[in-house]
Each structure stands twice: as C-alpha cells, then as structure tokens.
C-alpha cells in the first residue's frame, strides 16, 4: 500500500475484503469478477452490490484527475443487470426487517420498549414502515391497508421477541406476552454490541469449570465470526495449520468459520507463521472483535446469576493472551523484545523467573546477565532494558477496608488504591497487537477459599493515586459465612488485581475482618421466642406451646425443639432482677443433660437460639 501510495509501483492487487479498508484512489480500477466462494452454501455467489460500489468508488484522484475509469468484468448473462445498476438509480429499501433482533433488544435494554404496543409504535417511526407503505410487495405485505400493515408488524415483532426470549435476552412479565423486560444477557448484548445469538452461545456453553481451551472455542463459535471468509480450498490450509497448533481441532469441520477463527487464535498465541497473506488480514479481523466479545463473556460470568470466580479469572487471562500473543503457560519473560531462550535460561539461573522479578532487578545487574547471550547485540540488550524500565507498568497497590469489624447482613466497603511508576496507560506495549490499545485493570473480590465472586470492578491506573471503592454485603445468616476461624469469628477476603493486557503482572491480596455475631441476635430478635419474653403470660404461652408431647410436636412442626423436664425462673423476666453485666443469662433452669443434647442436636433446624 505504501509503495503504491508513493508511486513506486503502478498496479495494486487487493481482495474484495481489503478494498473496504484501503484508502488509495487510482485512475483505473478493474473489478476482475463479481462472484465469490461461499463456504456455507459451498458454491460461488454474487458479490453484494454495495461491495461493487465500494470497489469502483476507488476510481478517481481529485488532486490529479478530472475523470477516471472503472472496469467491471462480469458474465454475459449479468451484463445488462450491472449496466442498469451502474447507470440507473435503484430505490433504496430498508434492511431493518432482516436485522431486527439486535435493534429491538437494544431498545428494550435502555427502557424504550416495554410492551408490544410500544414496539409497534416504535416501528412506525422507522424507514422500514415508510417503505412498506410505498413498496409493500418487496416486504411480502399483501396490501397497503392499515390493518394488514399492523398485523405484519405485530407478527414480525412477536417472532423477534420469542427469539430474544430463547436467547435469554428478555423475560415476559405476563402470560399474554404483552409486556417484557430486559435481562442481564440482553443488557450485555446491547452494551457490547454483540448479537443475541452470541448470548445464546454463552448461555449454552459457558460453565463454571470451563477450561481455557473451552473458553477459546466458545469465543470462536460466536456469531460475530460467522462472516469470516473461508475461501475456496482454504480447508486444506486449515488442515495443515491444525497440525502445528497446540490444541487439536480435529473434531471440527475445516471449512467452518468457527474452526478457522480457533486456528487463527492458536496461531496468534503460538506465534506460528500464517500460510498466506489473506490469513493475516483475517487475523486482524478476528482480533479486532475479540476484545469486546471477551469483555461480554466476563460480564456474563461475573453477573449476579453466576458469579464464577475461576471462570472470570480465566477470561481475563484470555484477554491478556490475545493482547500479548502468548499462552498463559509461556514464560512471562518471553514478552520482552529480542529475548531468546538462552537469555531466559540465564535469567532463571540468576533467580529471575518472572516478569515482576525482572522489573525489580537492578539495571546494572540486568545488563550483565543479558550480555552473556552472544546472540544479542548491544542495541538489543539496551532495548530490552529500556522496555523493562519504561514500557511495562509497575503498579503499587494498597488494599484496606473501611471497617474491620462488620455485622451480619451489613455493608462492607473495600478500598483499593493504585498508582503506576512506569508504562503508558494510553498505549499497551504489545508487539503482536496491530493497533493502539488502552490499558485497563480488573479488581475482583471473593471469600477466601471459595469460587463465589462477590464483586468485580474495572479501573484505570495513572501516575497519581486513585481509589477504587467496592461495596458488598455480608451473608444474612451465620451459616452462610465461610469462616476462616469460627471461634474468633474471623473471615478472609481475597482481592485480585488483574491486568487486561499484560501477562504475569497480576497481584493478589488477602485481608481479614471480624463478623459481629451480636448483630445476628438483634436481627433475629423478632423471630426468636426466647428473646421476646417480657411477661409471665408470655412465658406461660411459650411453655404450653413447647412442652407438648413429642409425637404431637412432630405432627405440628417437624423443626420444633421440645424442652422436656425444664422449669423456668420467672424472676429473671423482670429486668430489675437480671444481672448487671453483658453475659447472656437463660430464663430456663434445671436443664438436664438430655435436655442439653436435645436442644443442641435440633438447633440447626430450630428458630430457638442456643444459649450458654
């Protein structure tokens, strides 16, 4: 492209796909053919007329020419069609009815549409409705009567809503399916501009324990890659490429776009040379859409309906691998420029095995280690050290809680302060990423030792301290708390600070807090019969209800605890007679060993609290 632009060569040959991306006006444009091979139908089909217009539109250099020439080579049977198309104007028709689902889902997600009537009224303001009234035959509408058009719009909208419900993007609120609301999947699809079909793939394929390979397969099978071109005989190239990649795709069809996308991802992260230049263009197209699709997968995995910690972390690793063009299992030192296996072994011998250890290494020592590799020139060594010092981010993180003693069903606020000492937040260092990319970070919060994600938040890190606040709530029941030390009532929170672009720079912290059990007693006071005793009459009623025979008690309430042989000290019901200290004192006396065991064994199923 640069040679043609600078006049060094006179002819440029480009594919139809590339013709959309280059901006190189020429005096003469030749379209060699108007057909292309469609792998879905396994035959040659006509190029869209918009592609033909785009290609012949390159003819003409305003700064040099007053006229230009475009030559379209077609079959004789298609000659009159293209002549009429090029020399006469065709009416512009709407394509909304062919792409209705994602438009309707977006309007539902933002709250514009909430009922069938809202949808019909919305469609009456579209270009589609205007063209239906002018050219009903094109849209297969019988006539131009208002009743007929209204029926057509309703039937079309109903079909769209059913498909969106099947994809888990909306939920109907009534049995008549007249009102509906957006779901988390629908909002994710609208925010990241992914197809509703992609959300259906997420629902069916994403699992809590999905592996990295399975996640890459889900990514490759999304509908965004359905239009990835598989040209004639490219299935042979795909088969040869499949022998070189680390993860087998032998169970997939070699002429499917999803298979080609998977192979391109694997070749990109394995840094395998691609067989032809068309694959380089295809790889750029695949990578260009991958970031927003993986971001949508992260939102799906971390939503309140799933909250999968391990799956979310693996998806963040997928972002890092795609950006850096490396596998997670590769040495993080391999991301440095000019680095060789010999240099990596020399660094390992000196105890520098990871990228953070290299970033913390003294400059002079790093120079001396790298110069042992005879394959590296002095310029290469200088470039490696410069990159380690300036291009990779060194981030300082401080994690704390606003309060280290919290109650049950109470709010907990985590403060995560971050600042950077190197690197450019507006441009990620990645030799294998083909265009500038902003750097971002994820902060993940989870109970220690569990796979339940409590919260996730995206953050930017600058040279100044920035604080990210994350609020969660503790469980409403003590039994739901994953205790670290139940006697001391302490729990641990795991905090993951993960980059969306760099491998090996993630940070992990564990922070402890204490759960105030007294808050649970206060919360359950209204439901606990023993804690609500105020008068002797209350005690008598309680005694009559709870001291019934065991058989009758089991009939009335299988969870009721029966206190047999116990007497009650009614003097303690008067607050004036109670001890003046904070110890809990039972109003039940003369408890036998059998009574104690009966209460303890049934305490898990009973609303009665166990008192000392």
Image: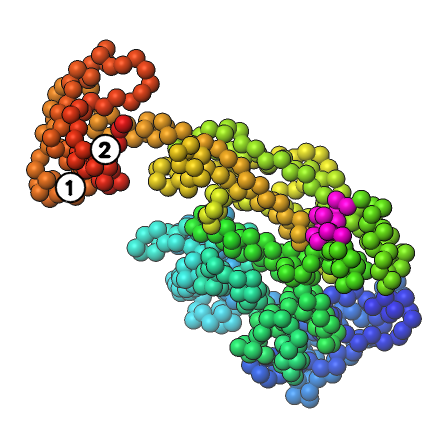
Q: Considering depth in this image, is 69 or 445 the residue closer to the camera?
A: 445
- The residue positioned 69% from the left and 87% from the top of the image is 75
- Quadrant the C terminus occupies: top left
- Quadrant the N terminus occupies: bottom right
Q: Considering depth in this image, is 388 or 44 the residue closer to the camera?
A: 388
Residue 303 showing in the rendered view: no
Which residues are the magenta region? 350-361
360 inside magenta stretch:
yes
Q: Considering depth in this image, is 408 or 347 the residue closer to the camera?
A: 347
Of helix, strand and loop, which one carries label 2? loop
Point out residue 590 in the picture as x, y percentages from the top left corner. 15, 25
- The residue positioned 42% from the left and 39% from the top of the image is 483
483 inside magenta stretch:
no
Q: Residues within 10 Å of mark 1 (few under 14, many from 20)?
A: few
Quarter of the image where one finds residue 253: bottom right
Point out residue 569 in the picture as x, y percentages from the top left corner. 16, 20
Q: Residues within 10 Å of mark 2 (few under 14, many from 20)?
A: some
Residue sitting farthest toward the top: 576
Of helix, strand and loop, which one carries label 1? loop
Quarter of the image where one finds residue 415: top right
Quarter of the image where one finds residue 550: top left
Query: Dot 2 corresponds to which residue?
Result: 608
Up-down relation of residue 352 to residue 513 (above or below):
below
Residue sitting farthest toward the right: 8
Q: Give the label on residue 33, or none.
A: none
- The residue positioned 75% from the left and 60% from the top of the image is 345
Query: Dot 1 corresponds to which residue?
Result: 557
């Amino acid at each position: 492209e640069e040679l043609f632009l600078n006049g060094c060569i006179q002819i440029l040959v480009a594919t139809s796909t590339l013709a959309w991306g280059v901006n190189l006006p020429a005096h003469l444009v030749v379209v060699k053919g108007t057909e292309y091979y469609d792998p879905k139908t396994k035959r040659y089909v006509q190029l869209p007329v918009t592609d033909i217009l785009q290609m012949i539109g390159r003819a003409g250099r305003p700064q040099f020419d007053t006229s230009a020439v475009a030559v379209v080579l077609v079959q004789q049977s298609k000659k009159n069609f293209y002549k009429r198309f090029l020399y006469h104007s065709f009416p512009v028709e709407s394509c909304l009815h062919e792409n209705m689902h994602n438009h309707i889902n977006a309007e539902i997600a933002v709250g514009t549409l909430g009922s069938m009537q809202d949808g019909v009224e919305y469609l009456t303001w579209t270009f589609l409705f205007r063209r239906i009234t002018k050219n009903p035959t094109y849209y297969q509408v019988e006539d131009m009567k208002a009743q007929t058009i209204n029926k057509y719009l309703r039937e079309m909208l109903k079909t769209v809503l059913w498909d969106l419900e099947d994809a888990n993007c909306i939920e109907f609120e009534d049995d008549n399916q007249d009102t509906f609301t957006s779901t988390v999947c629908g909002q994710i699809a609208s925010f990241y501009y992914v197809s509703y079909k992609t959300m259906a793939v997420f629902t069916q394929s994403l699992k809590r324990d999905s592996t990295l390979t399975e996640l890459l397969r889900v990514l490759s099978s999304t509908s965004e890659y359905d239009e990835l071109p598989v040209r004639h005989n490219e299935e042979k190239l795909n088969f040869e490429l499949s022998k070189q990649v680390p993860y087998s795709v032998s169970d997939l069809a070699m002429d499917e776009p999803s298979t080609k996308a998977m192979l391109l991802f694997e070749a990109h992260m394995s840094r395998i040379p691609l067989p032809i230049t068309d694959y380089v263009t295809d790889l750029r197209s695949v990578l260009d859409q991958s970031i927003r699709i993986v971001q949508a997968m992260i939102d799906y995995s971390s939503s309140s309906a799933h909250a999968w910690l391990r799956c979310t972390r693996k998806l963040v690793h997928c972002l890092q691998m795609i950006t850096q063009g490396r596998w997670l299992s590769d040495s993080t030192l391999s991301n440095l420029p000019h680095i060789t296996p010999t240099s990596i072994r020399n660094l390992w011998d000196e105890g520098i095995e990871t990228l953070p250890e290299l970033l913390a290494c003294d400059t002079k020592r790093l120079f001396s280690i790298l110069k042992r590799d005879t394959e590296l020139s002095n310029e290469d060594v200088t470039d490696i050290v410069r990159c380690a010092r300036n291009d990779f981010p060194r981030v300082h993180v401080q994690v704390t809680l606003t309060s280290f003693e919290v109650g049950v069903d109470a709010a907990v606020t985590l403060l995560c302060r971050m600042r950077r000492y190197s690197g450019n937040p507006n441009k990620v260092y990645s030799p294998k990423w083909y265009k500038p990319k902003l750097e971002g970070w994820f902060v993940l919060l989870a109970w220690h030792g569990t796979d339940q994600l409590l919260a996730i938040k995206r953050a930017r890190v600058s040279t100044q301290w920035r604080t990210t606040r994350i609020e969660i709530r503790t469980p409403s029941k003590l039994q739901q708390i994953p205790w670290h030390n139940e006697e001391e009532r302490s729990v641990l929170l795991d905090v993951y600070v993960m980059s969306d672009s760099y491998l090996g720079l993630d940070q992990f912290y564990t922070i402890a807090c204490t759960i105030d059990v007294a808050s649970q007693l206060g919360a359950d006071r209204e439901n606990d019969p023993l804690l609500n005793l105020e008068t002797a009459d209350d005690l008598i009623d309680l005694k009559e209800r709870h001291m019934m025979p065991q058989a009758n008690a089991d009939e009335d309430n299988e969870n009721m605890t029966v206190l047999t042989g116990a007497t009650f000290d009614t003097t303690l019901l008067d607050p004036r007679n109670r001890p003046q200290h904070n110890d809990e004192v039972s109003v039940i006396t003369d408890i036998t060993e059998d009574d104690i065991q009966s209460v303890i064994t049934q305490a898990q199923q009973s609303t009665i609290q166990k008192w000392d």
